[in-house]
Image (spheres, rainbow, N blue to C red):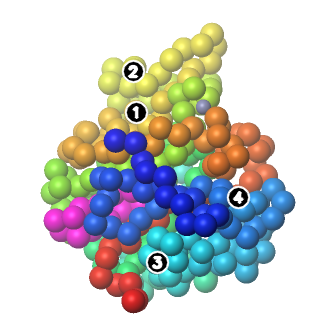
Amino acid sequence: MDLTVRRAGALEYLTAPALAGSIHCFSTRFGGVSEGALASLNLGTHRGDRPENVLANYRLLGRAVGFRPEQTVFTKQEHTAIVRVTAAADCGTGLLREAQDVCDGRITDEPGVALCCFSADCTPVLLFDPVRQAAGAVHAGWRGTAKGIVKAAVEAMQDAYGCRPENICAAIGPCIGLCCFEVGPEVARAMREALGPEAEPALRQCGEKYHVDLKLLNRIWLARAGVRRVDVSSACTMCSPERFWSHRVTGGVRGSLAAVIMLKGGEEP
Ligand SMILES: [Zn+2]
């Protein structure tokens, strides 16, 4: 299924039917207080924004979605396949104090821990096991996709929490689509090396270049991991730069989208 658009005043974000039962969202650019090139819902702390604006944006988004800024735990993304087990003691990492340990994915089985990953063309993926009550947030650019980080995250949930992959539900958020993601042959080669012939439907050759379908590639990884239910956003960040942050459209002068997921039970009334 496609994701659902939610609005609360000027704020707009997306939720996934597959993740029902969790507190989660994929953000858009709409509904924050940041200005200029960062207008208005910038959720990145390293984009040149004023810290008080970023904090205010988390407060606005969290109030609508159901988490507090103090509950967030950020990834420190470097296009790795590193997934970290995350606990309540980690809350505040990234927003209130600098994140130390590199990772592109986080998982938790503790309520009240709002896992956050970031994107602006790259693929955000949220995971939720309603049976075992565990969650994950993953950033998968093309490098992370080639490394199979979403499969690594599912396996980490199995190892750390005893999740069964068939119980895990996933949602792939807005990212650069097959329509716009033009890359050199090295990207296609990396996908072929990682996934073999299964990668072919996600690769379209256009002269010397390729168009690559990151959503489909991550769906393939999720299927390989044993995940059966996956919602996928139909949105392309580069086709809709007024609604989503697109690194390519902005030349890198941009805010960050966040994908957030938190298990129920830890929120304050
Ligand atoms: Zn597009």
Q: Is residue 155 visible?
A: yes
Q: From the image, tell me which residue sits under label 3.
A: 67
Q: Which element type, helix, strand or loop, lies under badge 3?
A: loop
Label whose residue precedes the other's in the sequence (3 or 1): 3
Determine the CA span between mark 4 and mark 2. Answer: 32 Å
User: Going 32% across and 35% down the picture, which residue do you hit?
Assistant: 220
Disc 1: which residue: 216
Q: Is residue 130 magenta?
A: yes
Q: Amino acid at mark 1?
A: Leu
Tell me where residue 207 appears, x and y as whole percent.
63, 10
Which tag is nearer the camera, tag 3 or tag 2?
3
- Report the residue marked by disc 4: 255
Picture quadrant of ligand 1:
top right
Type of secondary structure dominating the magenta stretch: strand
Question: Where does the magenta region start and end?
Answer: 125-137
> Label 2: how many residues lie within 10 Å, few (<14), some (14-19) or many (20+)?
few
Dot 4 alpha-carbon crowd within 10 angstroms: few under 14, some 14 to 19, many 20 or more: many
Disc 4 or 3, which lies upstream in sequence? 3
Give the residue type that dot 3 points to: Phe
**Residue found 64% across the figure and 72% down from its top:** 57
State if disc 1 and disc 2 touch (CB < 8 Å). yes
Please tell me which residue is depicted at 32% across the width and 73% down the height of the picture. Answer: 263
Based on the picture, tell me whether residue 28 belongs to the magenta stretch. Answer: no
Real-space Cα separation, disc 3 to disc 2, in angstroms: 38 Å
Q: Secondary structure at mark 2?
A: helix
Q: Nearer the viewer, mark 3 or mark 1?
A: 3
Identify the residue position indicated by label 2 in the image. Answer: 201
